[in-house]
Image (cartoon, rainbow, N blue to C red):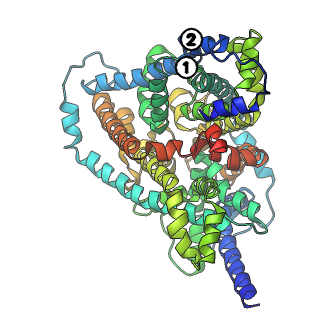
Amino acid sequence: MTATLTASRETPPGTARPRRGKRGRAGTRPRTFYLFVGPWIAGFVLLTLFPLGYAFWMSLTNTDGLSPHWSYVGMDNYVRVFQDGQTLASLGRTGIFMLATVPTGVAAGLLMAVMLNRDFKGRALFRALFYLPAVVPGVAAALTFKIIFDKNAGAANAAIGAVGGEPISWLADPWVRSVLILMMLWGVGGSMIVSLAALQDVPKELLEAARVDGAGPVYSFFKITLPILSPIIFFQVVTGVIGSLQVFVPSLLLAPVNGAAAVTAVPEGNYFFMVHVYAEYFAKSHFGYASALLWVLFLFVLLITGIVFKIGNRAVFYGGVDPSERKEG
Amino acid sequence: MNVDFARRARMTALYIALITLAVIFSGPLGWLILTSLKAPNELSVFPIQLFPETPQWHNYLDALTYIDFLGYARNSLILATLSSVLTTISSAWMAYGFARLSAPGKKFWFGLLISTMMMPGIITLIPTYLMFAKLGFVDTYIPWILWGLSGAAYMIFLFRQFFSGMPKELEEAAVLDGCGHVRIFWKIFIPQSWPVLAACMVLTFTASWGDFIAPSLLLSDETTTLAVKMTAGYVNEKGFPVQNLLAAGSTMFILPVLLLFLFFQRFFVQGFSTSGLK
């Protein structure tokens, strides 16, 4: 709608504009649309829908992936999910991990964004320094943290030794989960950048008016900035929750053993839900049961996404997102 | 005067906080680089040394030969280039459809696209791997070609936002001249969207360069990427990590990503975060 208005405004008067002519027909031909969007649809069907269906089919059997002798077991695997102590324990750990990383990550990112959201010397440098760890690949971040928290040669134990403490086995229980959480929080710059971008949307006049009326910075932050930022904070919390549900690779990378055997060596503290799924698949060859676990996770994520769409669809995805609408509105 | 003093005090407090944070955030990479320059006997002395006595620059050369670093880097480069070029072009192609064309069912597909943005890829990865194994795609780059050709939901969304903002006159004139949509896409939209193309290229390249789980599932020791080899390669005969070479190798592994980041910082910081998420 707005785009049409712009178009008519910018067209020189007197120019013939065959709106409902050739273009209209070419634009609405479904074949053209599907020519362009088709590859994505094909990819969705073959690389998302089909694997999910394949996993669902496996989840109804007791297949081990290799042996031709398998049988249909109905919902047995799903019943087992809720009786398996390891599954429930790993879910609990995942929940703790989520609580330890998501709120702190979003809050720290927001705090850093607020600190950087003003003009001062060196702003770009600080912004780059804080964001840098977020672009470091996960593999390299894990290797770096393994070196820092190495029992014999690491910086952490060096610092403890300097004040006369005993060295700690950081990469074993119970400490390894803290190392993982620190490693995740090291990448908080990603959240900072998103919040910093959102802060540009807070109208300066509004903050100025509040200041003139005698509102302090803390008051205006909670009463003006935070409400305006709420959709983006909501979005970060949701992606954070979904992200932490599937946390898995960092656990593997911090394990004392490398390669395929790593999953069996993940310390208990980092044995999260997806680690359990991976172990059931590749360490125990319980393909049927592991597929059921995967489907439970999938349904859970679907549920969260559904709730998000119900609550915040417009606010999160379309709140001023369309550039053409933004410039006009 | 008083106001000025308060302002200055606030700025000083801000700088102290920022510098403290800067030290914390650059600390890990700083330690990585210090470790990469240490001699073997400096690694586990007690109390642990902060700085190497003389920087062992040859650690970097040794790290290149301890594993076939350049060979694996070449694998990573091929895979990341393949994946980023394909993903970028195909995402732009599909975004053009979502931004500029209409058909029955478009709303449905777009809603689906948005919801797959939230879907964790890890859920489909394991069954996809099992499927690819059955099809004999293991130890080939075919999976990455397929993933590339079908685009990435987030990138399609990014391009779609950008294309929607382009003036309609562009293609109207072209259609009057008898131009089809395929040509409009290549001749008008692609040349106009280089900032998004570059951002998408860089993001998918670095994601693929750093990816661990897909290559470790799908590729063998010969064809695998540097990211996978890094985690297991730098160990001695007893299986213990050779810390200084591992640190030197890690530094070199991060370097391309950091360089891309520095060159394209604007895109990372402004282009992608503002156009994509708000």
Mark 1 and mark 2 in contact? Answer it, CB < 8 Å.
no
* Chain ID of residue with mark 1: B
Residue B107 x, y percent position in the rendering: 47, 26
Say which mark, if any, is on residue A300. none
Q: Residue at x 47, y 23 (%)?
A: A44
Is the residue A120 above or below the residue B108 in the image?
below
Q: Residues within 10 Å of mark 2 (few under 14, many from 20)?
A: some
A70 left or right of A246 in image: left
Q: Residue at x 37, y 42 (%)?
A: A310
Residue A97 seen in this snapshot? yes
Question: Which residue is more in the foreground, A9 or A238?
Answer: A9
* Residue that carries the numbered disc 2 in the rendered image: A29
* Tag shown at residue B102: 1
The vertical placement of A116 against B221, above or below, is below
User: What's the amino acid at mark 1?
Assistant: Ser
- Nearer to us in this view, A135 or B135: A135
